[in-house]
């Protein structure tokens, strides 16, 4: 596509560059089978462990007939966090390997490069989410969402995947090595645990309630849980989308600044 644009007398635009970068990132992901398997296997293993090992001992309240009905939305967000974290490593590897300098010599800006990584991360995460959701159906998860509920739940999930992927891209620019980038993203993957993902917030120590109730992952999990089970969710979806929009705006701005600093 870029070659066609040049032959027609116009330079490829940022969207074309971003599409090419996304295709490149997806091809690299396809070759990195170890990372793909881990991004799929780890959330599934955690879901099976919580459901079959700990589920009988966890009180999720009278609204949930079984623990699997409670835990699946949290596992889906956990899966998104793990999948998005690989973006940081990929960006850091590009910075370390010098490929960014080559792209800049071809007049490819920083935004298309990072947007390509984020787009590829979104595709990978949606595939991983579909696999995790399929396993959840096999072990007893029975959603009761309306069509509107499905669409809103999908919108919230995509918004968080994109926001977390951009945050990971910024971390990849900040880190000085792929190993450091991988370590930094652990904190982002940790966020679902001090939330309502696996246990009710009321069961946590009182000093943790404030953080667990007001951190960005909790409204997303509460929204997904309520929407997928066909229950009233109040303002939780809009709070979740506001968090996602805020994180996305900060991450894009930070990525632009960090890219200029790292490529001076």
Image (cartoon, rainbow, N blue to C red):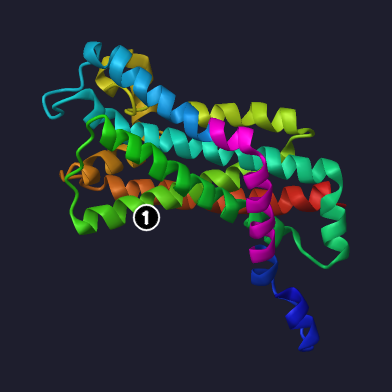
Residues packed near mark 1 inside 10 Å, few (<14), some (14 to 19) or many (20 plus) = some
Residue 19 visible in this rendered orientation of the protein: yes
Magenta stretch contains residue 22: yes
Residue shown at 51% from the left, 30% from the top: 189
Where does the magenta region start and end? 19-38
Where does residue 2 sit, x and y in percent of width and height?
74, 74
Residue 211 found in image quarter:
top left
Residue shown at 30% from the left, 34% from the top: 136
Residue 11 visible in this rendered orientation of the protein: no
Q: Residue furthest bottom?
A: 8
Where does residue 184 sit, x and y in percent of width and height?
64, 29
Q: Which of the two residues, 107 or 3, is positioned nearer the viewer here?
A: 3
Q: Which residue is mark 1?
A: 155
Residue 167 left/right relative to 127? right
Q: Residue furthest left?
A: 62
Residue 33 found in image quarter:
top right
Quadrant containing the N terminus is: bottom right
Name the element at disc 1: helix
């Amino acid at each position: 596509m870029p070659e066609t644009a040049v032959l027609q007398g116009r330079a490829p635009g940022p969207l074309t560059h971003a599409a090419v970068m996304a295709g490149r990132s997806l091809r690299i992901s396809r070759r990195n089978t170890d990372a793909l398997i881990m991004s799929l296997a780890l959330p599934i293993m955690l879901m099976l462990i919580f459901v079959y090992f700990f589920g009988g001992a966890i009180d999720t309240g009278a609204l949930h007939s079984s623990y699997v009905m409670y835990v699946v939305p949290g596992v889906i967000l956990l899966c998104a966090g793990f999948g998005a974290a690989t973006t940081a490593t990929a960006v850091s590897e590009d910075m370390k390997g010098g490929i960014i300098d080559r792209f800049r010599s071809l007049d490819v800006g920083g935004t298309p490069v990072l947007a390509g990584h984020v787009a590829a991360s979104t595709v990978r995460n949606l595939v991983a989410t579909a696999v995790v959701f399929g396993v959840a159906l096999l072990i007893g998860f029975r959603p009761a969402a309306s069509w509107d509920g499905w669409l809103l739940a999908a919108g919230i999930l995509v918004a968080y995947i994109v926001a977390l992927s951009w945050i990971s891209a910024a971390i990849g620019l900040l880190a000085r090595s792929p190993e450091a980038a991988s370590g930094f993203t652990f904190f982002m993957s940790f966020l679902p645990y001090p939330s309502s993902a696996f246990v009710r917030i009321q069961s946590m120590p009182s000093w943790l309630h404030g953080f667990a109730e007001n951190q960005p992952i909790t409204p997303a999990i509460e929204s997904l849980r309520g929407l997928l089970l066909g229950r009233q969710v109040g303002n939780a979806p809009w709070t979740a989308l506001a968090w996602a929009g805020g994180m996305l705006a900060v991450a894009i701005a930070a990525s632009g600044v960090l890219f200029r600093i790292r490529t001076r």
